[in-house]
Image (tube, rainbow, N blue to C red):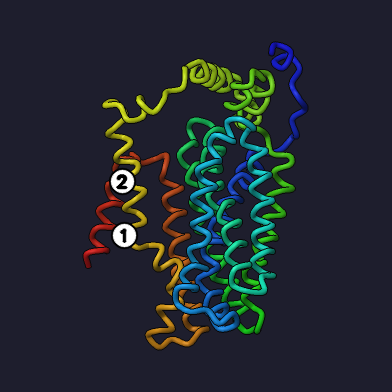
Amino acid sequence: MQANSNAPQKIHKVSSGFVYFFGALGGLLFGYDTGVISGAILFIEKQLHLNSWQQGFVVSAVLLGAILGAAVIGPMSDRFGRRKLVLLSAIIFFVGALGSAFSPEFWTLIISRVILGMAVGAASALIPTYLAELSPADKRGSMSSLFQLMVMTGIFIAYVTNYSFSGFYTGWRWMLGFAAIPAALLFFGALILPESPRFLVKEHKIAEAKQILEIMNKHNTKVVDQELTDIKAQAAIKSGGWTELFGKLVRPALVIGVGLAIFQQVMGCNTVLYYAPTIFTDVGFGVSAALIAHIGIGIFNVIVTAVAVMIMDKIDRKKMLIGGAIGMACLCSS
């Protein structure tokens, strides 16, 4: 054990910006692969002759895979490390994207979309944790929310891609396959990304963890030493079990956290995300006009999320949360 602390592996000399960009690139893939189906389904429906339930299955297949991916990624990342799981997620993104693009019929497309969903679920749980563990304490809020900004950016790119390929007969295959490009970028970027300092401390690789903290904190010795001390203290705390998770002390935060996640979905935002072009065409828009209108929604999402990222570490997060909840309630009731 001690040998690991004194003989750190070589750390690639990369900037903090490189780490944040490639770390959050999984968020862009998350957004792209969930958003692209909204336009692609208009063409898949006709070429693969899908009925209503088959269309719904194609759209929701990613979510089925996401459940599995999100469920297993936590224990796996604690065992194998965040960086290796980012690499694995990139491979699954790549395979799922190409599999979807080359699917000759309905069930092949479903299987490919489920595989893709596993990477989506893994990214949703892994990337925010990875970014938070690498970020300096004073930037942790904004850097963690960078994932959401990349998700919105990915959705916007998906909408633009949908419109760009809408004039081609096999355009939906290009729409789905385009995701292989950022997946490949994520894989090669992750090859030189650093491991999470918290995971390294857990594995008793103290010197290596300190090197990474120095890179991310611009060699501020005082901050690095404090961060390392805090990480060591947290690593020494015995992990709680299910009893502690549902205990009286944690229960209020658990209920609020889970409730927010549930109601954010129940309010119907994903209905717009997945079916806005279909809704627009049903009310009389042409396909091109529907896809352009959808791009407008994507632009608005990116702008609002970018503002949230910029003010995340400047405004009380509880107030932001309450304000967002009030806004959603007002808009849903209007």
Judge by depth and name the residue closer to the eye, 189 or 252: 252
Image quadrant where residue 198 sits: top right
Q: Decide which of 213, 235 is in the foreground and name it.
A: 235
- 62 relative to 82 in the view: left or right: left
Residue 30: give x, y in percent of width and height.
Answer: 55, 55
Which residue is identified by label 1? 267
* Mark found first going from the N terminus, 2 or 1: 2
Residue 164: x percent and y percent? Answer: 61, 77
The quadrant of the picture occupied by the C terminus is: bottom left
Which x, y percent locates residue 139? 49, 36
| Amino acid on which the number 1 mark rests in the picture | Met
Element class at badge 1: loop
User: Relative to the observer, which residue lies in front, 72 or 327?
Assistant: 72
Residue at left 65%, top 28%?
Answer: 212
Seen in the picture, residue 298 relative to 141 is either above or below; the reply is below
Residue located at (26% from left, 26% from top): 248
Residue 199 image position (x, y, % from top left): 60, 27
CA neighbours of label 2 inside 10 A, class few (<14), some (14 to 19), many (20+): few
Q: Quadrant of the N terminus?
A: top right
> Which label belongs to residue 259?
2
Position of 14 with respect to 294 (left or right) is right
